[in-house]
Structure formats: C-alpha cells, structure tokens
Image (cartoon, rainbow, N blue to C red):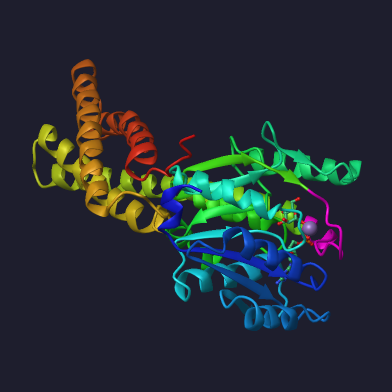
Amino acid sequence: MNKEIRDVRICFVIPTYNEALNINPLLSRLTELYGDLDVAFLIVDDESPDGTAHLVREFMEKVDGRVRLIQGKRRGLGDAYVRGMTHAIDTLGADVIVQMDADFSHDPAAAGRLLDRIAGGADVAIGSRYVAGGSLDERWHAGRRLLSRWGNRLARWIGGLKGISDCTAGFKAIRAEKLREAKIESVQARGYVFQVDLLHRLINCGARVVEEPIHFRERERGETKLGMLNMLEFFFSVLLLRLRSHLTFVKFSLVGTCGVFVNLGSFSLLIELGLNKFLASPTAILASIISNFLMNNHWTFGDRAMTSRRSVRGFKFMIVSMTTLLLSYTVFVVLSMLFPKVLPVLLQAGGIAPGALLNYYLNSRWTFREASREE
Ligand code: GDD
Ligand code: MN
C-alpha cells in the first residue's frame, strides 16, 4: 500500500443492524488485511436484537483491541453514520474514514484501493459500481437495478451531482478534514439518500472526488434493511437538495434588489444635497456594492463551506466591485451623453442593470465559489 497511507490514522466506520452472521468474518478479514496500519474499526450498532454488539465486544476483547463499538437507538443508516463518523474524527482522531457495509457487499480487499486513491490526492474515493470496470451482482433483479439506475439519474439531474456515476454508493474513503468542513453532524438524511446528501455537501466544499471501480456483491447472509420508506425519502430529499441551491439564488436576488434601493436611495439623497450627478453616481454605486457584500457574505453564502479565506474573499470582492463600478459608470456616462435630457435617476438605473449581472456572475463563480469537482 501507498506510503502516505501508512502515516495517517484510518478509521473504518461500519454500521450494523442484525449482522450477527457477518460481523465476525468481516472483522477477521479487515484486521488481517489492514492490521499493520494505524487503524481502528468502529462498529455502530443500534440495539440489534440478534446480538451483533455482543459479538463485537467479544472480538474486541479476545482478538483485536482496535475494534471499537458505539451503540444507540435505531434511527436509520444516515443517523448511524453521522454518529460513527463524528466519533471517529473527534474521539478516535481519524484522518481518513472508510465507510462500508457489514454484509460483504463491499469487498474488504477493495478498501485498500480506495485508500490508495486518497494517498494519490483525492479527498473522496468512491467505490463505484457504475464506472468502467465496476459491476453489480447478477442476482440483483431487474427492479432493483432500475431503481438504482434511476435513483442515480435523479441525484445527478435534480440533486445536482453532475459527473458522478455512482451517487448512492455506500463504500467510500473520505478525508476527515473534508467531513468536518462539510458539517457532517448536521446531515438529516436517513436511508440511501444519506449517501447523496453527504456527497452533495462534500462537493460543495470543494472536495476532489474520484471513482474507483468495484464489484458490488449481493449479501450472502442476513437480509437488507433499507425498504420502501427509504425510497420515498430518497425522492423527496433529492428535491430538497435542489431547493437548497435555489434558495441561495433567491437570497442573492433579494440582496441585489436591496442593493438597487440602496443605490438609487443614496443617489437621490446626494443629488438632493446638491452633489453633482457625475460624483453622486459612483458614490451611490459604491454604497450599494458594500451593502451587497455584507449581506451576501453573512446571509446568502453564510452557510456555504468555502475553501477560500475570508480575507481572500474580501480581496476578490473588491476586484469584482471595481470591475462592476467601472462598467456601471461607463454605461451611465454613455447614456448621459446619448440622452442628456433624461431624468438622471433613470440613467443611473441603466448603469445598474449590466453592472448587477456582471456582479452576480463574478461573485457566484469566483468570490463565493461553490468549489467544484476537479476530476
Ligand atoms: N446502525 C445501523 N442502523 N446500521 C444499519 C441500519 C440502521 O438503522 N440500517 C442498515 N444498517 C447497516 C446494515 O447492517 C449494513 O451493514 C449496512 O448498514 C447496509 O445496509 P443494507 O440493508 O445491507 O443496505 P443495502 O444493501 O440495501 O444498500 C447498500 O447499497 C446501497 C446502494 O445500492 C448500502 O451500501 C447503501 O448505503 C447504498 O446506498
Ligand atoms: Mn447490503
């Protein structure tokens, strides 16, 4: 395995519900494969009635002390992962998290390839069924295949995960630092959609995502826990993901509208105070730019996990502001020469329109950039 991976602390996070038939073979295999790394194996069990937790504790005491167990009330897969990942980072000090199922659908040996991709510079390595080289168990019937395919399409088209082939994959290696940035603790999703929600957040905070082909095997023992209700949740939650992005746009427009009032208001006031209209115009533009920045920074993009530092953002905003000022003022001057008799406030409004468009474009794409995937 790659040298860099030997220098970081790795934590496997594995949720279980009634996996008594799988847990021992899985832990044996994982400790055998990865036992010589700086590693922990965290099982998140939610009161499995079949005694999974008891088996884990036994393994931990008799075979390998690096196996850990946390327990809680059963509130779904997403909830189990949130608790598990948070514990792995905050308490176990993990640098890299590997999430996987306990039922051997995810080949323990393939985790090494995911870790190698992280060592190669990725923030997130997805064990992907749908990239070239990846595959799905023959035993998956047509109905489940269709559901998975369409679930992925919805996640891409509506959820906004463009360019990702396997959006619902439950087998991933993720840098802890990115999970923290993505505010993992605030994920609400419970079923399959947890995977989509998490990926959405990671991409929004600029994570470099790669896909590594894997074979997904149907479980041999025990039964699946994700049912109809999770599929319903999936469709609604993917829609909500989209609305989350739209909300940002609505906020930006509202801020822009406020900016127009600040601009025209201060312009009229300055004219009223007797200032020359050619001086009142840039002053008013500047006032609106400053109020726009403050509102966008604290409100519109306030909850966006951004990669840039605030000082860098401020600097970029200043450059965008100057560009906007230049454009708005140029338009104002040109219009003033073309239509010298028109009411000054209308000329000023004519300058705002193209300036506002440029301002939106540059700020959303650059200053407050929702950093995107780079591969
Ligand atoms: N702690 C806990 N609590 N664990 C749970 C819960 C829960 O409420 N529900 C499921 N699990 C555990 C299972 O014991 C198993 O280890 C893992 O989560 C996955 O559950 P399965 O029931 O085997 O899910 P699946 O095979 O239908 O779905 C898998 O493939 C999907 C994509 O097709 C998972 O990897 C999904 O995350 C993935 O989206
Ligand atoms: Mn499974």
Q: Is residue 181 left or right of residue 239?
A: left
Q: Nearer the viewer, residue 319 or 94?
A: 94
User: Is 276 drawn above or below residue 41 in the view shown?
Assistant: above
Q: Position of residue 134 (x, y in %)?
A: 71, 37
Name the chief secondary structure element in magenta. Answer: loop
Residue lying at 20% horizontally and 47% vertically, measured from the top left: 287
Total tally of numbered discs in the picture: 0
Q: Position of residue 195 (x, y in %)?
A: 64, 54
User: Is 287 drawn above or below residue 352 in the view shown?
Assistant: below
Residue lying at 44% horizontally and 70% vertically, measured from the top left: 93
Ligand 1 location (quadrant): bottom right
Residue lying at 47% horizontally and 43% vertically, measured from the top left: 208
Q: Position of residue 285 (x, y in %)?
A: 22, 40
Q: Nearer the viewer, residue 114 or 284?
A: 114
Q: Nearer the viewer, residue 34 or 199?
A: 34
Residue lying at 23% horizontally and 31% vertically, measured from the top left: 323
Q: Is residue 31 visible?
A: yes
Q: Nearer the viewer, residue 145 or 125?
A: 125
Q: Residues in magenta?
A: 217-231
Magenta span has 230?
yes
Q: Is residue 307 left or right of residue 38?
A: left
Q: Is residue 243 visible?
A: no
Q: Which of the 4 quarters of the picture holds residue 322?
A: top left
Taking the view exactly as shown, the residue that stands out farthest to the top is: 338
User: Is 372 drawn above or below residue 306 in the view shown?
Assistant: above
Magenta span has 266?
no
Q: Position of residue 141 (x, y in %)?
A: 91, 44
